[in-house]
Image: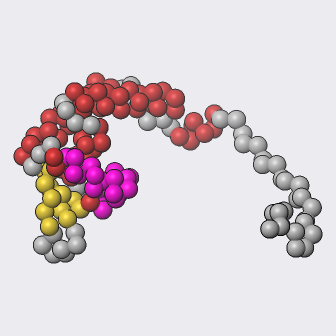
Amino acid sequence: MLAEFRYQLRKYLRFSEDVTQREGVTPLQYQLLLQIRGYPGRQWATVAELAERLQAKHHGVVALVSRCEELGLVRRVSSASDLRKVEVHLTDAGEAMVLHLAQLHRAELLALQGRFVVPDLAATEAALPPRRKPRTRVDAPARPPGRTGKPAC
């Protein structure tokens, strides 16, 4: 059951990779747009917030935002409340792109409905063979004092 779940998940992710690239963006660029559009409580996010949502390094998200900015999908705005922060907003083109791609993804999820079943993890774990106890390591004899095993200089 877990293998089937992973298979269906991989098929969906492959679909996502193919459809985003066909539409002219990378899967990660789509994820960025999606996280900005769906950020809770507002229509923008900071780079630090996006790094957390994407589970990526801050500097990597800065580069990703720069590439999306070059494509005209996002724009950076200095924060009015904290000049150290930069807000990342969707442009009209970015909004149109994320809505179009989300619609394609939604249709694919509907097509997968019934085949994309989250496994019962308790039942899956119960079906696995019992875990073996780890072997205890026999302690190696201690080295004599003053001997580190490194050659003398």
Q: Is residue 58 left or right of residue 140?
A: left
Vertical placement of 129 versus 73: above or below?
above
Q: Nearer the viewer, residue 137 or 111?
A: 137
Looking at the picture, how far across and down is residue 12, in whole percent?
35, 30
Q: Quadrant of residue 112?
A: top left
In what quadrant of the picture does the C terminus appear? Answer: bottom right
Residue at 14%, 35% (x, y): give it: 100
Q: Name the spot of residue 36 as percent of width and height, x first.
A: 21, 52
Q: In the rendered structure, which segment of residues is drawn in magenta?
A: 48-68
- Report whether residue 130 is seen: yes
Residue 135: x and y in percent read 82, 49
Instruction: Please report the residue visible at 35 percent of the width from the left and 28 percent of the height from the top.
Output: 14
Q: Nearer the viewer, residue 50 or 12?
A: 50
Residue 146 percent across, percent down from the top left? 88, 73
User: In this orientation, which residue lies closer to the viewer: 45 or 12?
Assistant: 45
Q: Residue at point 26% right, 60% down?
A: 47
Mark count: 0
Q: Is residue 152 left or right of residue 95?
A: right
Q: Residue furthest left?
A: 92
Where residue 25 sits, quadrant-wise, is top left
In the image, 22 versus 31, the foreground residue is 22
